Image: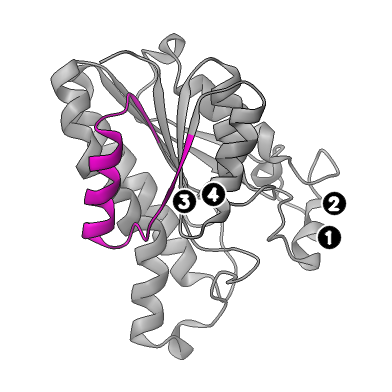
Amino acid sequence: MTRSRALITGAGAKDGIGFACARLLAEAGFAVALSATTDRVLDRANELNAAGHTASGHIGDLTLTEDVDHLLSELGSVNILVNNAGMGTKAKPALEKRLTEIANDEWDHELSVSLKTAFLVTKAFLPAMLSAGYGRIVNVASVTGPYVSSPGSSAYSAAKAGMVGLTHALALEVASNGVTVNAVAPGWIQTGASTPSELSAALNTPCGRAGRPEEVGAAVVFLASPAASYINGAVLVVDGGNILQERK
């Protein structure tokens, strides 16, 4: 297995973090596989191929074991896995309800689309990395959950904090096999799913602006590179220093 193939989940949105990661990994010389729930992911792959890169698009619901198994059968193996699939799209924003108002099925859905997808996809693609003695797993978490939160974000916070916990535990399990597991924790990042209130809040960061998807992608590419071989179980915050502020 060559050290040159990356899978990025949740990469269907043209202006999202997932596609930014895929584009930057492709520009770094990796063949990239993009996964999303709708056929727009095929457009993203076509864009990369038109730019001279090697890319493929894959449609599936990664909360379902059978869809993850199908993705594995299509790709075979990857050296780099970026678990970016999660809640919060323009079509279906992240749930914002106080805990007592959340229905059981809503809670299950919110945790499934972020945390369960990371579990299922990692479980499927990890064995080949372990056999090869090389792999890079980067989980896209958030500052929301591990570091900060807000009323109405309990489900999102729990899922993203869970991704950090998964990162820590798995990093200990696989390091001796040449596989590293790290996470990035974005703050206010401007995507097509950003709400006006989120973009307004971003103006109060030390940088005075929202982050760009490619700024998160740059951190992901570094953690996915051979140069990051001794970074394991880390969480790299990409928020312009916002969580450092006691007064916002």
Q: N-terminal of the two: label 4 or label 1? A: 4
Callout 1 secondary element: helix
- Which region is colored magenta? 56-81
Q: Amino acid at mark 3?
A: Pro
Distance, label 1 to label 3, CA atoms, is: 22 Å
Mark whose residue sits in front, 4 or 1: 4
Q: N-terminal of the two: label 2 or label 4? A: 4
The reply to whether discs 1 and 2 touch (Cβ–Cβ < 8 Å) is yes
Quadrant that contains the C terminus: bottom right
Residue 21 lies within the magenta run:
no
The x and y percentages for residue 205 are 78, 46
Which residue is denoted by mark 2 in the rendering?
Answer: 203
Q: Residue at x 30, y 22 (%)?
A: 135
Callout 4 secondary element: helix
Q: Amino acid at mark 2?
A: Leu
Q: N-terminal of the two: label 3 or label 2? A: 3
- 39, above or below 185, in the image: below
Distance, label 1 to label 2, CA atoms, is: 5 Å
